[in-house]
Amino acid sequence: MSSSVSLPLWLVVLGALLAAWSLVASIMLPGVRWVLRSRANKVLDEVSSRLRIEIRPFQQTRRQALIDLLAYDAKVQEAVAAQAKAQGMTRELVTARVRGYAREIVPALNAYVYFRLGYWAARNLAQSLYRVRLGYADTEGLARIAPDATVIFVMNHRSNMDYILAAYLAADQAALSYAVGEWARVWPLQQLIRSMGAYFVRRNSRDQLYRRVLERYVAMATEAGVTQALYPEGGLSRNGLIGEPRLGVLDYMLRNFNPEGGRDIVFVPLGLNYDRVLEDRTLLLAGDARAKKPGLARAAANTLGFVAHQAALMLRSKWLCFGYACVNFGTPISMREYTRQNGFDFRRLGKEERFARVAELASYLMISIGRLIPVLPVPLVASVFDAAPGKRFSELELKAAAEALIEKLEARGAHIYIPRRDRDYAIGAGLQMLQLRHLVEEDEGLYGVASSELALLRYYANSIAHLR
């Protein structure tokens, strides 16, 4: 005997969705995780033999374990107790907030994503947009870094391409861990960034509990020897000039440093520069308090318009790369040696004196970075026009002024990248790029700055203003 049972359509659909979710959660997701984990382990075994600075056990620890370790750290729990008492809350509620902060901050480095997908994407993107060059490098100094040292690459911040360029050129040295702002906390970008070993930072947060959690994560990673990349300026330059250093993360790294301990902290200064910064007009606009800022929709439309224009040029075989991008690696600075020479220990200083010492170090690092910033064709030629913005140059006068500037910069120890080792070609390449962007106009054989583009031309000249 048989009978039929009728069910409402919504119940059938709901049952099918629940069954599909159960299948995905119990079979497919564990399988995917196993495949990714096995591939990551194979890549980890492969790269460990060739990296100058090995991936630390801290970076291989399961993310949930690191979150628990951070949330129940003794100093974090002291802050939890203080806030619970001050605000009349239970420790459980405050600890829940802390766990939320920890989940937000803690990365999850995946060697396969970093060294296969990430490196492939970084290399191809950088090389498709720029003629990428590694300029100067203190190879002897880099070779002297102790294998167990915590290495911090410190650099100027010109563009969001800095993350990609530095990771690409340092891929044979280490897996870099960056501090990334809240702009990147969107799905699925944040998952990818976490897999690359980066941690998220709330810029200018006044939440003392959050700051304590962030401080402890940075301290733990530094004490564990995790190789990190740090922008002392804290943000992108809005006018092309090197900015003043910010001390927060630097202080987190150093306040517990033991100069007599087993692990040194070594800062490696990097200088980056570009013939064209992708965000140049946006950065200038953001730095002008009087300018009307576009809304989100307008900004998105501008970005899409830029991408569409570049794609159209590619399709018509008229696209040219954005010139040269160059990185210089400087002499490593050992904190063990630095503190010994200056006769102090960060751990034994009061807050005000410690901050003063950190500020001194930050200034020293920024000077070291500034000396390393490469002089490229566009900043070189832009500097000639910036020195006499109302003047119109013949080609011969322009080349003579650029040659004189090169001699002056070389005398001051600047690192000048001369493509093809041909100064005439370098000056011509810089002039061509400025003309293509309509920053410089030619009239009857004389070249001058387009009056409406003086601010943008000066933005590029400013990148080497400290060297002139």
Image (spheres, helix red, strand yellow):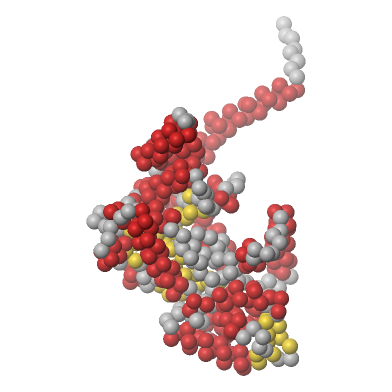
* Residue 35 in view (yes/no): no
Q: Residue furthest left?
A: 260
Q: In the image, is residue 338 above or below residue 45?
A: below
The answer to whether residue 445 is left or right of residue 173 is right
Provide residue 274's location: percent of width, then percent of height: 56, 71
Residue 324 rendering spot, x and y as whole percentages? 56, 74
Residue 373 x %, y %: 48, 73
Q: Residue drawn 70% across and 80% down?
A: 450
Q: Name above or below for residue 307 compared with residue 216.
A: below
At 45% across and 80% down in the image, what residue appears?
Answer: 414
Residue at 62 percent of width and 86 percent of height: 388
The quarter of the rendered structure image containing the N terminus is top right
Residue shown at 30% from the left, 58% from the top: 264
Q: Is residue 75 visible?
A: yes
Kindly indicate the quadrant of the structure image that contains residue 70.
Answer: top left
The furthest residue to the top: 1
Q: Nearer the viewer, residue 59 or 242?
A: 242
Residue 5 versus residue 255 in the image, above or below: above
**Residue 47: where, in percent of width, then height?**
40, 55
Total count of labels: 0
Q: Nearer the viewer, residue 184 or 259?
A: 259
